[in-house]
Amino acid sequence: MINFNKNSVFNLKPIDISEVRNEVQQFLIENEDIECAFKTFRDQVIFTNKRIISIDVQGLTGKRKSFSILPYSTIQFFEVQTQGFMEIFPDSELFIQYANGFTAQFEFKGAVDICRLGKIISAYVLKER
């Protein structure tokens, strides 16, 4: 379950952009593109060129969804942790702290280019300032 109020760590696996839930399109603004996407069992986290959008699918039927938007523009700093060499269960992490003190931590399972995520965030954060 994705719940940013509890500073959760997620076990995210990469998915193809074509697998992103259709509802995300209603949140995208002009010139905003999806860069990469990840999922847990039912939930998704989408990294665009402007922000992070998470979808928390709720209830037994999954009809109720909670969308959280994390803009890059208010990031104070972030940290990436790459996979270790020859790990049995490779994972990498992304930690973000926002200017208001809020933090979000993401744990990615499998082969994820965490440096690419860092580059996406850096490009937008540094462009804003």
Image: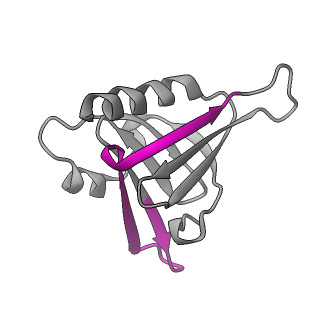
70 magenta-colored: yes
Residue in the picture at 54% in, 60% down: 42
Q: Is residue 60 left or right of residue 91?
A: left
Residue extending farthest to the top is 85
Q: What color scheme is it? A: one colour
Quarter containing the C terminus: top left
Residue extending farthest to the bottom is 59
Q: Quadrant of residue 92?
A: top right
**Residue 44 horizontal/vertical position (percent):** 48, 53
Q: Compared with residue 113, is residue 65 higher up or lower down, i.e. above or below?
A: below
Residue extending farthest to the left is 30
Residue in the picture at 27% in, 28% down: 127
Q: Is residue 50 left or right of residue 84?
A: left
- Observer-nearest residue: 63 or 29? 29
124 magenta-colored: no
- Observer-nearest residue: 116 or 129? 129
**Residue 99 horizontal/vertical position (percent):** 41, 54
Give the prevailing secondary structure in the magenta stretch.
strand
In this rendering, does residue 113 appear at all?
no
Quarter containing the N terminus: bottom right
**Residue 45 horizontal/vertical position (percent):** 47, 50
Q: Compared with residue 71, is residue 108 higher up or lower down, i.e. above or below?
A: above
Residue in the picture at 31% in, 45% down: 73
What count of labels does the image hold?
A: 0
Residue in the picture at 60% in, 63% down: 7
Range covered by the magenta-colored residues:
55-82
In this rendering, does residue 47 appear at all?
yes
